[in-house]
Image (cartoon, rainbow, N blue to C red):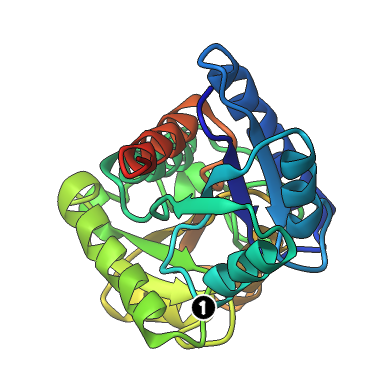
């Protein structure tokens, strides 16, 4: 029997994020069940299930070696190894190997491109303004219809703002800038530019990214969240973009969806798991 896969989720009290995290764990459990590998997931703090409870459950079921994989798009901080070291103190027989974070895997970039293209495709299907809807068309309520105002905008006049979570870790923030460049060169080179912004903690925020695109001459901007699952962070991205759009009705601003629970993301995680298993003696 293979060692179980333990997914370590980012701490969150967000019900929407936790629900999608749970669905993704279930997806992986179904995928790996055929190979006899158990799958569990837990959070470092605040949200449930807690990491400590998930580890205790695995040990109680007879597992004493596992693969711990941070479900993260960015560089892993010290809190992850510290948490696993604490679990090893609680369970002296426990052994574990780390799986690499997802990072800018080519398939992750391809998923971002899908979300970008989904948002761009809607440009040809004008609809009434819905300020609170998903992927909102951000313009003033009394502005001209979108088919009149925006129909002549070319891809070269469209910019992209890739939005990361934001961190106190400078290396993690630098990684998001690197992803923006990789994304532009591999999937978005027809667009004017791909700028980087962050939801919180570090500048530039979403308004700062949008403002840079406007000053570069963009007539349309598509905001692409570099986030795994929907929830409070995504809502903050949309809220910041909406607030900026309210003051700039001449700029067509669109918001794409997050990567989300999907088979391609599961493929990446399973590859990270299999990669870590090669280190197991």
- Number of disc labels: 1
Q: As displayed, is residue 10 above or below residue 230? A: below
- Residue found at x 32% / y 46%: 109
Q: As displayed, is residue 30 above or below residue 15? A: above
Using the image as rendered, state which of residue 166 and residue 255 is in the foreground. Answer: 166
Image quadrant where residue 30 sits: top right
Q: As displayed, is residue 93 above or below residue 264? A: below
Image quadrant where residue 44 sits: bottom right
User: Does 191 sit left or right of 100 as displayed?
Assistant: left
- Residue found at x 73% / y 43%: 59
- How would you rate the neighbour count of disc 1 (Cα within 10 Å): few for under 14, some for 14-19, many for 20 or more? few
Q: Position of residue 15 (x, y in %)?
A: 84, 52
- Residue found at x 41% / y 60%: 221
Q: Secondary structure at mark 1?
A: loop
Q: Position of residue 194 (x, y in %)?
A: 29, 64
Residue 231 seen in the figure: no
- Residue found at x 23% / y 45%: 187
**Residue that lies at the very extreme toward the front in this rendered image:** 93
Identify residue for label 1: 78
Quadrant location of the C terminus in the rendered image: top left
Using the image as rendered, state which of residue 187 and residue 27 is in the foreground. Answer: 27
User: Does 49 sit left or right of 167 as displayed?
Assistant: right
User: Does 248 sit left or right of 177 as displayed?
Assistant: right
Q: Position of residue 118 (x, y in %)?
A: 46, 35
Image quadrant where residue 140 sits: bottom right
Using the image as rendered, state which of residue 58 and residue 128 is in the foreground. Answer: 58
């Amino acid at each position: 029997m293979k060692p179980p896969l333990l997914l370590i989720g980012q701490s969150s009290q967000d019900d929407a994020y936790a629900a999608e995290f749970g669905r993704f764990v279930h997806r992986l459990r179904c995928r790996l069940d055929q190979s006899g590998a158990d799958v569990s997931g837990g959070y470092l703090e605040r949200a449930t299930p807690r990491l400590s409870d998930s580890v205790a459950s695995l040990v109680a079921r007879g597992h004493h070696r596992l693969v711990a994989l941070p479900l993260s798009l960015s560089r892993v901080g010290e809190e992850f190894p510290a948490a696993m070291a604490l679990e090893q103190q609680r369970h002296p027989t426990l052994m574990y190997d780390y799986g690499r974070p997802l990072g800018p895997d080519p398939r992750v970039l391809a998923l971002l491109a899908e979300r970008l293209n989904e948002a761009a495709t809607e440009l040809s299907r004008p609809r009434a303004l819905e300020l609170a809807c998903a992927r909102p068309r951000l313009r003033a309520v009394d502005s001209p219809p979108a088919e009149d105002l925006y129909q002549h905008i070319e891809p070269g006049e469209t910019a992209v703002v890739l939005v990361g979570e934001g961190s106190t870790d400078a290396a993690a923030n630098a990684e998001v800038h690197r992803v923006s460049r990789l994304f532009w060169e591999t999937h978005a080179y027809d667009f004017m530019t791909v700028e980087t912004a962050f939801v919180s903690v570090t500048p530039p925020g979403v308004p700062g990214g949008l403002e840079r695109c406007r000053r570069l001459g963009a007539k349309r901007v598509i905001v692409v969240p570099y986030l795994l699952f929907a929830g409070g962070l995504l809502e903050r991205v949309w809220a910041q973009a909406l607030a900026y759009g309210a003051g700039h009705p001449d700029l067509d601003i669109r918001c794409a969806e997050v990567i989300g629970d999907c088979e391609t993301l599961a493929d990446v995680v399973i590859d990270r798991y299999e990669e870590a298993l090669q280190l197991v003696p």
